[in-house]
Image (spheres, grey):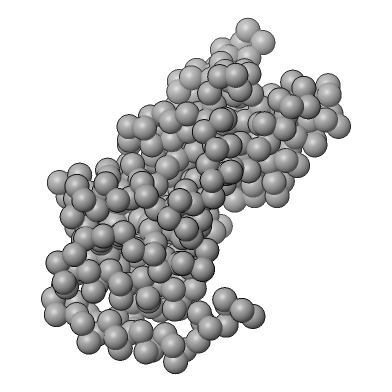
């Protein structure tokens, strides 16, 4: 298949790995931002093809993983309401909140439905005018255009019983937070190709200039990843720090302009808390006027600590597992198998943290593809 087979070709991968070895003269630490890239790296054993001087660490680009526990608790509280049909992509259902997950809400009788598009949730709202339909809008810039379109359509069609619980996060502020941390180890980044398909890569240029780190927009197949690493190492060895585009078959410098225009129409930036990391200024989206009537946080008056609906207040306690080091994993400071709970107290069947649940989570990748990783 075009753009798949040639990017999974073993000989091509070996050739790029040899090229990387030929230019590497000293230790370098590179972070791949996206959880999809993490899974490719672990699934295909890419680190084993690299010289021992190169260390790959895994970044915060798993949207399920960085959705804060307070937001999961809000979702659970809203989904538990009798008149609500709560809709979500499937991978959010097993993410642990403080007391339970959305799947448990469903088992207890709540109406929680998996959808494959936020527009499906708008259709559900049209068909159920006596119910409130809420979509859990989680993700990076990649999923934001579809969620923006759902809100745009709901307003255009005059649908009043639809809203989104919005927990969108943005990649560039996360990179900046990692780079400005005193603990930072990362010297170069593989940026997420699909995010840049939407947003382009101009917004990364100030980061390379300020922090003097190379950022290479990279795809998701094994040869993509190896080429991204090669381009990053080449810059590091030559003392350059630029934005380069390995994923040129999908990404243009300016991105997808209609999608960006829609995002600007529907959303504005806001401070967001990232699970395990903390608050990062201007790192997320919230609905802007005149679309705030579609904001479930406004509709249900959910705050970080209390939830109000129909005059009833409920206290929300946020409680993380004290064994889970997901915050360190998401910042590239630890690897999943360095967590004492990995594969013991924490498994995909009984996850303690979101990185073990998500199809993009680093802990799930190590569990699935690297069974020899065990403390
Ligand atoms: S293995 Fe489980 S407990 Fe440990 S960091 Fe990953 S999700 Fe958290």
Q: 157 or 317: nearer the eye?
A: 157
Position of residue 318 measured from the top left corner of the image (x, y, whole percent)? 43, 30
Q: Quadrant of residue 124?
A: top right
Position of residue 183 in the picture relative to residue 111 (left or right): left
Position of residue 236 measured from the top left corner of the image (x, y, whole percent)? 19, 68
Residue 201 against residue 55 in the figure, above or below: above
Residue 297 against residue 19 in the figure, above or below: above
Position of residue 28 in the picture relative to residue 352 (left or right): left
Position of residue 307 in the picture relative to residue 106 (left or right): left
Q: Residue at x 63, y 14 (%)?
A: 309
Q: 183 or 283: nearer the eye?
A: 283
Q: 87 or 201: nearer the eye?
A: 201
Q: Residue at x 45, y 67 (%)?
A: 247
Q: Residue at x 80, y 36 (%)?
A: 123
- Is residue 189 visible in the rendered structure shown here? yes
Position of residue 120 measured from the top left corner of the image (x, y, whole percent)? 75, 42
Q: Quadrant of residue 212?
A: bottom left
- Quadrant position of the C terminus in the picture: bottom left
- Quadrant position of the N terminus in the picture: bottom right
């Amino acid at each position: 298949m075009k753009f798949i087979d040639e990017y999974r070709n073993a000989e091509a991968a070996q050739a790029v790995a040899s090229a990387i070895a030929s230019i590497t003269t000293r230790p370098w630490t590179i972070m791949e931002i996206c959880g999809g890239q993490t899974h490719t790296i672990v699934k295909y054993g890419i680190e084993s093809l690299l010289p021992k001087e190169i260390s790959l660490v895994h970044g915060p680009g798993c949207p399920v993983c960085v959705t804060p526990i307070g937001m999961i608790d809000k979702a659970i509280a809203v989904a538990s309401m009798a008149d609500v049909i709560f809709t979500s992509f499937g991978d959010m259902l097993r993410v642990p909140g403080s007391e339970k997950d959305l799947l448990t809400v469903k088992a207890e009788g709540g109406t929680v439905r998996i959808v494959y598009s936020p527009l499906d949730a708008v259709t559900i709202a049209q068909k159920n005018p006596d119910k409130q339909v809420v979509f859990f809008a989680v993700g990076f810039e990649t999923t934001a255009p579809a969620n923006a379109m759902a809100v745009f359509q709901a307003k255009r069609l005059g649908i009043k019983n639809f809203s989104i619980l919005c927990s969108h996060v943005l990649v560039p502020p996360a990179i900046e937070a990692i780079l400005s941390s005193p603990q930072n180890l990362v010297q170069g980044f593989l940026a997420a190709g699909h995010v840049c398909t939407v947003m382009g890569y101009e917004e990364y240029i100030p980061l390379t200039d300020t922090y003097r780190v190379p950022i290479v927009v990279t795809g998701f197949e094994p040869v993509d990843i190896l080429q991204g690493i090669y381009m990053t190492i080449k810059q590091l060895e030559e003392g350059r720090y630029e934005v380069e585009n390995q994923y040129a078959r999908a990404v243009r410098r300016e991105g997808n302009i209609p999608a960006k225009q829609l995002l600007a129409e529907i959303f504005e930036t806001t401070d967001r808390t990232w699970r395990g990391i903390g608050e990062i200024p201007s790192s997320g989206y919230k609905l802007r006027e005149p679309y705030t009537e579609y904001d479930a946080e406004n509709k249900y008056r959910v705050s970080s600590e209390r939830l109000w609906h129909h005059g009833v207040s409920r206290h929300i306690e946020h409680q993380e597992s004290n064994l889970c080091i997901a915050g360190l994993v998401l910042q590239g400071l630890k690897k999943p198998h360095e967590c004492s709970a990995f594969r013991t107290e924490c498994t995909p069947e009984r996850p303690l943290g979101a990185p073990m649940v998500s199809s993009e989570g680093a802990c799930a990748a190590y569990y699935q593809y690297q069974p020899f990783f065990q403390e």
